[in-house]
Every structure is written in C-alpha cells, then in structure tokens.
Image: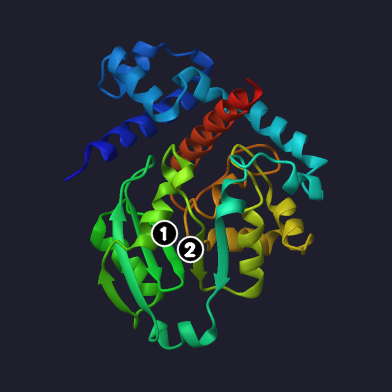
Amino acid sequence: METQHEIDYSRIEKAIAYLKLHYKDRPSLEEVAEHVNMSAFHFQRMFTDWAGVSPKQFLQYLSLEHAKGILKEQQATLFDAAYETGLSGTSRLHDLFVKVEGMTPGEYKNGGQALHINYSFAESPFGKLIVASTSKGICHLAFADEGDGKAFAELHHKFPNAVYTQLADQTQQNAIFIFTQDWNKLTEIKLHLKGTPFQLKVWEALLKVPMGGLTTYSRLAGLAGSPKASRAAGSAVGDNPVAFLIPCHRVIRSTGEIGQYHWSTARKEAILGWEAAKAYRLTDTVAE
C-alpha cells in the first residue's frame, strides 16, 4: 500500500510531465490540478510545500535556456580550483559531506561472501528508497519503484553471498538526512563502493558538481582525469550504485537536454528542479 509521501510524489511527477508536455499552451493552475485529480488550492499547497516554489517557477528551472545558461556559466570555471573552493557550503553539500571508499577485491570476491549488509526502506521527496550499508559505509541506494521485494532482489543480485539483515542502522539514517531541510544534522556520509578505479574517479568527480549545478559527460570525464573518455564516463554514471548521494542526475547532454536517468527521466527532472529551487533560495538568503 502506498504511503502519503508516495502518493504526493506520484502526483507531483505527473504534474511536471504535464507541464513540460503542454508548456507552449501555458496551462493554468486549475488545468494542471485537474490532471492530477486535485483542487487548485490543494495542488498549489502540496507542490509549494514540496518544491519551495510555485509550479510555474519550477518549470523555468527545467527549461533548455536555464540548462544552457548553467553550462555556460560553469564552462570557464569548472576545472579551476576556485570552482571547488569558492562555492558556499550549502551548494557543496555532496563534496563536503560524502566520502567514497572503494571496496577491496577481498571484500567483494565470491559474491560478497565477506560482507555483512544491513538494509532498510525509507521515504524521500522523490519516492521510496532502499538503502544498504556495510560496516564501512553506504554500499547501495536506489528508488524502490517496483516494491520492496524487487528492490531487495536487485541489491541481492549485486552481492549474492553477503549476509543480509533488515535493519535501519545509524549509517543509513545519517545518509537519509541529506533529503531534509536541516543539514546541520549531517555528519560525514561514507560510501563503501564496488567499482573499477575509473568508475570510482567518475563518482568522486560527480561530488564536485554543486547542487543547482549541471555538467556534461565530456566535462565529467575531464574532472575524472580522462578528458577523452566521455563514453566511459557515461557508462560509469549509468553504473552509479548510490542514487542522489552521488549526483549522477546532474549530468545532462551538451545540448542542454535533460537526457536519460536510470530511475526515469521524470524523476531526474523532479530532482533537478527541486535542487535548483533550493539552491536559488539559499543564494537569495545569503545575499540578504
């Protein structure tokens, strides 16, 4: 049975898709609300509570012009040290709080036989999650769109011989704080990941793309130290084992188009708009 969080997010995702499909017609608030079977008043309140901005403002953050503007702004600074050191702490959330450690071959050999993995399910602004951790950190985080059983089966497939316990431990709970409004509660989030040296470099490079920021596959390859390996960087993005914490959703096409996402393009749009709204509110707060 769906929770209220899941029902609300489903409506929001459906509304965003409708707004994008009919943006040239400039649908009214009433039309969008009717599409998701809500009154205009309740839809506006639900959406604004979720995003912090109105549906109309939110759609602007998903426009091609906005994406191109972000890419153009970052073109000159992306590879500069100033890009990393000059950002505010709030924008650098992932870079500051998330640390990656690669699993050793001994840890993941024989299907992860040496691993003890705790896992649990949690709510997020973008739907239900499964989150899993070893004694060293988060090893898996994914959206559980097809139910708890399917979500666990996908985790089990990665480490078929690990020992599993359904337990929400402190490591997982701390990681989930990244979705909350109060980041003062965050302590360092450690990720314990199975990946090739190049994949780990790409995943670490993604942490340098700030909230509200965007990058392309070719730029990401450069950040990972292999500027000619954009295709391999794209594959590493697709293999990201930790949704949101490693922000692979911030990689878009060089044309400014959103592009695909392992957990659906609609969710990618929802996350990017949500982050942009949050980042711009933080910028306005600092400016004040």
Can residue 111 be seen in this snapshot? yes
Q: Quadrant of the C terminus?
A: top right
Of the numbered discs 1 and 2, the one sitting upstream in the chain is 1
Q: Badge 1, how many Cα within 10 Å: few under 14, some, many 20+?
A: many
Check disc 2 and report the residue beneath it.
241
Check disc 1 and report the residue beneath it.
141
In the image, what residue occupies the spot 65% across and 62% down?
202
Nearer to us in this view, 245 or 88: 88
In the image, what residue occupies the spot 40% across and 86% down?
114
Query: Spatial distance from mark 1 to mark 2, Cα to Cα?
Result: 6 Å
Can residue 264 be seen in this snapshot? no
What secondary structure is marked by label 2? loop
Mark 1 residue type: Leu
Residue furthest left in the image: 1
Nearer to us in this view, 152 or 255: 152
Total numbered labels placed on residues in the image: 2
- Residue 18, compared with residue 30, is above or below; it is below
Q: Are marks 1 and 2 in contact (CB under 8 Å)?
A: yes
Q: Position of residue 118 (x, y in %)?
A: 32, 69
- Residue 34, compared with residue 61, is above or below; it is above
In the image, what residue occupies the spot 33% across and 36% down?
9
| Residue 212 quadrant | top right
Find residue 125 and name its label.
none
Q: Is residue 228 left or right of residue 255?
A: right
In the image, what residue occupies the spot 65% across and 47% down?
209
